[in-house]
Image (cartoon, rainbow, N blue to C red):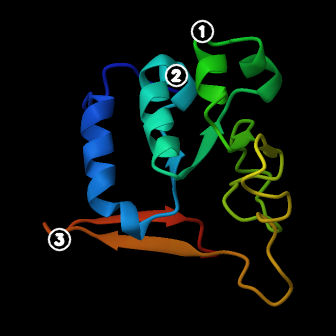
Amino acid sequence: MFEPGIGTPVEAADLLARLDRVRDQVQGVTLLGGEPFEQATALAPFARGAQERGLSVMAFTGHLFEDLRLDRPPGARQLLALVDVLVDGPYRADLPERRRRWSGSANQRFHFLTGRHAPGVELVAPGEIERTIELRLRPDGTMDRSGWPEK
């Protein structure tokens, strides 16, 4: 899950300032990698700021929705109240997802917590490509990749 001490701490105000610079290019933000709910209290101001800017908030977690509602881990309910779509459950490589966008494995569940997005938005329509990747080239020449290609 989450490894404390790895990464670089960033204040919510700094993240929101970065978000303001690209606000017209995005529809929402996604919280994942470092376990978001292990840092829920720190992420809540960022999620609130994103919503105040009219953006959607999606979160991925290895925790189960039922535990988050019980405030496990501590602060989870505060962040959960600011999330439009939650994908819960641990990633399982032995259960690859083929029907839904965004989730990595078939055991993960989608929870639509507000009316902002309707169930079904995650489904791959007939004829659409099932597996995609996104590549982002940075100015320094490095590249980020997300998604799961077939090979």
Label 1, on which residue?
74
Residue 57, horizontal then vertical, whole percent: 58, 46
CB contact under 8 Å: marks 1 and 2: yes
Left or right, 17 with respect to 95, comes to left
Q: Earlier in the sequence, mark 3 or mark 2?
A: 2
Q: Amino acid at mark 1?
A: Pro
What numbered label is drawn on residue 141? 3
Q: Horizontal placement of 118 versus 16: left or right?
A: right
Q: Would residue 122 be found to the left or right of residue 13 on screen?
A: right
Q: Are marks 3 and 2 in contact (CB under 8 Å)?
A: no
Q: Is residue 87 left or right of residue 147?
A: right
What's under tag 2, amino acid-wise?
Answer: Ala
Q: Residues within 10 Å of mark 1 (few under 14, many from 20)?
A: some
| Residue 75 occupies quadrant | top right
Q: Please tell me whether residue 42 is drawn above or below residue 91 in the rendered image.
A: above
Identity of the residue drawn at 68% across and 54% down: 104
